[in-house]
Image (cartoon, helix red, strand yellow):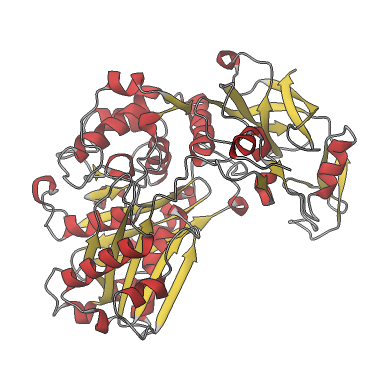
């Protein structure tokens, strides 16, 4: 249990899974990246929903390739978020996954020179442990 | 045309000082601004029967504030959860309450205390909802979200740091003539470019100046307004737009914003267009918010905002005066209600040294990214 301020500020935000998102976190814990998908019209949905936003069909989590391209990105240089107050800068990317136009996942782009990141760059997801708890999260690396 | 809101008028404006750290409660500041707006309107608290505000759960609510200025009986009251995205609809809601006889005199306010600073997220460590996916990666505050949008614009349209700088520089120049502004020292392009990075492509001068303070407006019917001390300012029409579930990373094209949808609706409702605006109070939580929404409202083509500002078209003597008070970037971040205050002051012809000569129409926008709205004020009855 986290008890003092210094510890709190050293720990990154932890996700609070709910009934709609639990499948995402179950999959990452098993080393897989899975995204919510309508079982009727096959639309991918992120963030996940209990029923499809287009056809109200039932949804389930299905594995995705984890590949895609950088839609946009930032280089974070101002400490603003717990767990990320040191070791700056870091790069956060909005990635459009190959599975569907507009299907986006926002995460860090690891092991990259911030000056070399470009919109349109190809990337691939990799699952890593999140500090401060039991969660596994996807981060991207240049493909 | 959808201009029924002009049956109402803004008849009073009030505000506190805008300061970094007031040491005051949000209740105290909201009460001061509300009393000040009522005094300006020539009305007393006992004549008020409507109270409304917006907040992110961070400040004193309308019933508390009404009670604090001695009002024991409020008829119409709403507290709206939201930020810049709801400003236009909250002000329009007050006007609609008046036009539909739900209330006679409504106070609208926004107050921000030192407990609210959107640029940092030091307290939150457990994140649910849509934020649960990105927050663990150190991504959860607005100066990060809208830097994302800006980067996309730079990649697609070739807009530059110098273009953002032109917006920041003009805001500061305008603020230098505004004694109420918190940041009044003019900056040069060199100053802008030497500003520390916040989140690339945003530097410090791309981000609004968060302050403590409150702003209040008094709204009543156009009929009653005739007997009050100031020239009534009419909200002609409003248009809001919200999309993609409000998620900041899902909007289909980050080179534009909510205004892509809201702008044509507003122009269609009124038969007016960008050329008809004397003033544009553009919501400027970030310089890029001005860039994207200014394009969406049709003042210029994509990628031309930097040159538009550099060539003087957005200031005195140009096509339209953008943020004569200095905006959220330099007057202070009062969550957009200070844009309404300035619009009313200018359209009354009471803005002193920074008066935009002959101003009759003002576009006032609020919001950024996937949600927001805009309202047009005029100073003659339609």
Residue lying at the far right of the rendered structure: A30
Which image quarter is the C terminus of chain B in? bottom left
- On screen, residue B251 versus residue B262, left or right, reads right
**B41 w.r.t. B207: above or below:** below
Where is residue B183 shown, x and y percent of the image?
Answer: 25, 37
Residue B168 in which image quadrant: top left
Residue B71 in which image quadrant: bottom left
Where is residue B369 shown, x and y percent of the image?
Answer: 50, 45
The answer to whether residue B382 shows anywhere in this view is no
**A124 w.r.t. A104: above or below:** above
- On screen, residue A41 versus residue B126, left or right, reads right
The answer to whether residue B332 shows anywhere in this view is yes
Closer to the camera, A28 or A44?
A28
Residue B8 in which image quadrant: bottom left
Where is residue B232 shown, x and y percent of the image?
Answer: 18, 69
**B49 w.r.t. A72: above or below:** below
| Number of dots carrying numbers | 0
Image point (67%, 47%), residue name: B127
Image point (69%, 26%), residue name: A69
Image point (42%, 26%), residue name: B159
């Amino acid at each position: 249990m986290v008890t003092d301020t210094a510890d709190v500020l050293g720990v990154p935000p932890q996700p609070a899974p709910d009934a709609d998102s639990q499948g995402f976190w179950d999959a990452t814990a098993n080393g897989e990246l899975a995204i919510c998908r309508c079982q009727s019209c096959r639309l991918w949905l992120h963030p996940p929903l209990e029923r499809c936003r287009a056809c109200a069909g039932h949804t389930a989590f299905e594995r995705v390739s984890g590949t895609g391209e950088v839609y946009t990105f930032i280089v974070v240089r101002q400490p603003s978020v717990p767990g990320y107050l040191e070791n700056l800068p870091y790069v956060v990317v909005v990635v459009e996954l190959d599975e569907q136009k507009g299907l986006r996942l926002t995460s860090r782009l690891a092991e990259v020179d911030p000056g070399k990141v470009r919109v349109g760059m190809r990337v691939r997801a990799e699952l890593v442990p999140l500090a401060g708890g039991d969660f596994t999260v996807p981060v991207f690396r240049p493909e | 045309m959808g201009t029924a809101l002009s049956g109402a008028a803004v008849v009073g404006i009030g505000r506190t000082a805008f300061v970094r750290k007031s040491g005051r409660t949000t209740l105290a500041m909201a009460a001061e601004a509300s009393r000040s707006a009522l005094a300006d309107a020539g009305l007393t608290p006992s004549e008020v029967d409507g109270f409304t505000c917006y907040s992110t759960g961070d400040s004193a609510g309308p019933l508390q504030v009404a009670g604090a200025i001695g009002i024991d009986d409020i008829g119409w009251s709403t507290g709206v959860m939201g930020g810049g995205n709801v400003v236009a609809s909250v002000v329009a809601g007050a006007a609609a309450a008046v036009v539909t006889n739900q209330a006679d005199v409504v106070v609208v306010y926004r107050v921000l205390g030192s407990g609210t600073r959107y640029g940092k997220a030091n307290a939150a460590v457990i994140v649910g909802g849509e934020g649960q996916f990105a927050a663990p990666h150190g991504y959860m505050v607005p100066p990060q979200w809208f830097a994302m949008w800006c980067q996309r614009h730079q990649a697609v349209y070739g807009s530059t740091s110098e273009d953002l700088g032109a917006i920041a520089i003009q805001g500061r120049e305008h603020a230098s003539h505004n004694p109420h502004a918190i940041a009044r020292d003019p900056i040069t392009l060199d100053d802008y470019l030497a500003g520390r990075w916040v989140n690339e492509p945003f530097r410090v001068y791309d981000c609004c100046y968060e302050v403590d303070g409150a702003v209040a407006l008094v709204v009543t019917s156009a009929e009653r307004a005739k007997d009050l001390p100031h020239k009534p300012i009419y909200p002609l029409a409003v248009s809001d737009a919200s999309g993609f579930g409000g998620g900041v990373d899902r909007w289909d094209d980050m080179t534009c914003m909510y205004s892509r949808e809201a702008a044509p609706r507003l122009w269609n409702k009124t038969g007016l267009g960008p050329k008809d605006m004397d003033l544009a109070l553009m919501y400027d939580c970030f310089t890029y918010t001005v860039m994207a929404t200014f394009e969406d409202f049709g003042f210029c083509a994509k990628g031309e905002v930097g040159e538009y500002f550099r060539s003087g078209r957005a200031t005195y003597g140009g096509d339209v005066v953008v943020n004569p008070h200095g905006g959220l970037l330099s007057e202070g971040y009062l969550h957009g209600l200070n844009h309404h205050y300035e619009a009313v002051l200018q359209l009354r012809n009471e803005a002193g040294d920074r008066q935009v000569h002959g101003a009759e129409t003002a576009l006032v926008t609020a919001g950024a990214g996937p949600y927001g709205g805009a309202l047009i004020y005029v100073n003659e009855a339609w």
